[in-house]
């Protein structure tokens, strides 16, 4: 006889109680009974019995979409005297040991059930209700208003529960990202990504059973908060997994969700939604602490740090990588693109594309002639910056690989960064002339046609670039990349998720 299993089963049937900021759940035998608190938290008002009853019925209706065999219905709890009965949600009790949060904390293998959650969520999103009233909640302006509401609700706690400097940085970064990304959110709406989702996907409310996961406790008290981008829905669980100390699982979960949902969202949007979910949790912790929950105070700083980490990692950047021929700018640009998951646009490739020439075909000509004439050069930079603008507005950071020897071109790039509310970084590659010449003479193929003579002519006409950070490319390439990363990701490049995470076998 397996006494360990028997003891676990006994624990799962023992009486217990659990409390959240909006409700209390009583566990007895095979059932769980949820009572709504008569509270007004600003974003939810449950002070009337009529509203609590409506929310209970709504909770059962909505949660049956994800766990139809768990939500049994709404009953009434009668007290002594003539006091009206209190509505309660009646549920099938889930085994506590199968809770996803418990398994993650115990470092148990959860990849397969987590993959199943991603598949279940994406499948629901594919068939979920849609419509103009739902899509409106996925707009840039609606998201910005939700952020602002949270900022106002947290403002009384600045310098008390939450650090004032951290809160100010969060607000500045959020509004900056949103200001320049309206086309991104518009494209998400046009692609049908805004759905009636779960809205509150937490690891404590997911149970990994033998016949598949059960996803409980969706957001029921305000439909508008459940009408959201599917990626936002998934990001809540990613945030919760990271909060539980499993960032690798968070990354894999979002990758699986994106795969099942066929969602090509930029990394910046994933980071933004994870940050949003972390800040909402930080806000709730502030409110619970104000209600007298002393334990909630310990959650605020980690959640604030998680918010900032993702806002910093998701900042949209325009990175100019320049320098004279042979200084290694293209090598550095490609490496930065790989490390940061950025789009890389190369001026030599664009120049030849505009001329109808394959990138690896030579178009060598004396300085300032042929496709290197001033007119063609102006057209090349205009195209380069135009393509960068489209990408930046869609939330993609961009590396622009060009010489940037003309001051007017750098001014146009600076204006572009300002217009799209992107962070601008200017990196100027330098190498000893002898090494640069050696590199140019050793080239075979590739888009660049520059030789030492052209490089000398460019150097003679190059405008000073004092605002650029100098990158020494005379040593190992990895060293130059690390120097560049320390500039463009001063808070740590390790926090930037790559486009495709390392996945377990199978």
Image: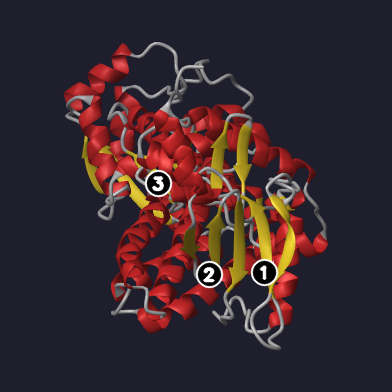
Q: Which residue is mark 2?
A: 147
Q: Position of residue 103 (x, y in %)?
A: 42, 38
| Spatial separation of the CA atoms under disc 3 and disc 2 | 21 Å
Q: Decide: few, some or many residues near mark 3? Use Cα within 10 Å; few <14, some 14-19, many ≥20.
A: some
Mark 1 or mark 2: which is in front?
1
Mark 1 or mark 3: which is in front?
1
Mark closer to the chain start, 1 or 3: 1
Q: Which residue is mark 1?
A: 221
| Spatial separation of the CA atoms under disc 1 and disc 2 | 18 Å
User: Based on the displayed image, in which of its 4 quarters is residue 133 positioned?
Assistant: bottom right
Any mark on residue 242, and which? 3
- Which residue appears at 27% of the width and 30% of the height? 327
Quadrant of image for the N terminus: top left
Q: Is residue 400 above or below residue 33?
A: above
Q: Nearer the viewer, residue 214 or 246?
A: 214
Q: Nearer the viewer, residue 114 or 196?
A: 114
Q: Nearer the viewer, residue 303 or 44?
A: 44
């Amino acid at each position: 006889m397996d006494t360990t299993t028997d003891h676990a089963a006994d624990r799962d049937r023992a009486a217990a109680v659990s409390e959240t900021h909006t409700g209390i759940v009583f566990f007895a035998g095979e059932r769980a009974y949820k009572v709504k608190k008569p509270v007004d938290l600003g974003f939810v008002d449950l002070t009337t019995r009529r509203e609590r009853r409506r929310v209970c019925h709504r909770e059962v209706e909505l949660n049956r979409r994800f766990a139809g065999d768990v939500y049994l219905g709404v009953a009434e709890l009668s007290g002594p005297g003539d006091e009206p009965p209190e509505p309660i949600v009646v549920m099938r009790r889930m085994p506590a040991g199968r809770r996803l949060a418990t398994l993650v904390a115990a470092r148990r293998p959860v990849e397969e059930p987590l993959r199943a959650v991603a598949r279940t969520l994406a499948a629901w999103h594919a068939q979920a209700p849609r419509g103009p009233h739902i899509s409106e909640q996925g707009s840039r302006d609606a998201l910005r208003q939700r952020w602002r509401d949270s900022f106002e609700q947290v403002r009384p706690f600045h310098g008390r529960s939450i650090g004032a400097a951290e809160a100010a940085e969060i607000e500045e970064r959020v509004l900056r990202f949103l200001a320049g990304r309206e086309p991104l959110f518009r494209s998400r709406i046009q692609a049908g990504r805004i759905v009636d989702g779960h809205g509150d996907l937490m690891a404590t409310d997911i149970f990994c059973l033998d016949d598949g996961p059960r996803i409980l406790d969706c957001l029921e008290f305000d439909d508008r908060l459940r009408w959201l981008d599917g990626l936002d829905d998934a990001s809540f669980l990613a945030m919760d997994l990271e909060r539980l100390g499993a960032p690798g699982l968070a990354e894999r979960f979002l990758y699986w969700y994106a795969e099942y949902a066929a969602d090509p969202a930029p990394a910046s949007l994933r980071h933004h939604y994870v940050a949003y979910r972390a800040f909402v949790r930080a806000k709730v912790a502030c409110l619970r602490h104000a209600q007298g929950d002393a334990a909630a105070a310990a959650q605020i700083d980690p959640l604030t740090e998680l918010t900032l980490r993702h806002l910093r990692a998701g900042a949209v950047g325009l990175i100019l990588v320049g320098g004279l021929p042979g200084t290694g700018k293209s090598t550095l640009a490609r490496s930065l693109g790989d490390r940061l998951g950025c789009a890389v646009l190369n001026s030599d490739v664009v120049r030849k594309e505009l001329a109808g020439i394959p990138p690896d075909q030579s178009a060598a000509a004396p300085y300032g002639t042929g496709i290197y004439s001033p007119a063609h050069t102006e057209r090349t930079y205009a195209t380069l910056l135009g393509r960068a603008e489209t990408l930046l507005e869609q939330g993609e950071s961009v590396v622009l690989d060009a010489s940037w020897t003309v001051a007017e071109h750098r001014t146009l790039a600076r204006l572009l960064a300002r217009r799209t509310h992107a962070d601008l970084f200017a990196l100027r590659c330098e190498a000893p002339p002898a090494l640069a010449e050696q590199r140019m003479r050793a080239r075979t193929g590739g888009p660049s046609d520059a030789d030492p003579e052209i490089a000398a002519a460019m150097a003679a006409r190059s405008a000073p670039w004092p605002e650029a950070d100098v990158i020494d490319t005379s040593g190992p390439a990895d060293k130059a990349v690390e120097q560049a990363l320390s500039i463009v990701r001063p808070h740590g490049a390790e926090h930037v998720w790559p486009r495709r995470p390392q996945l377990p076998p199978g």
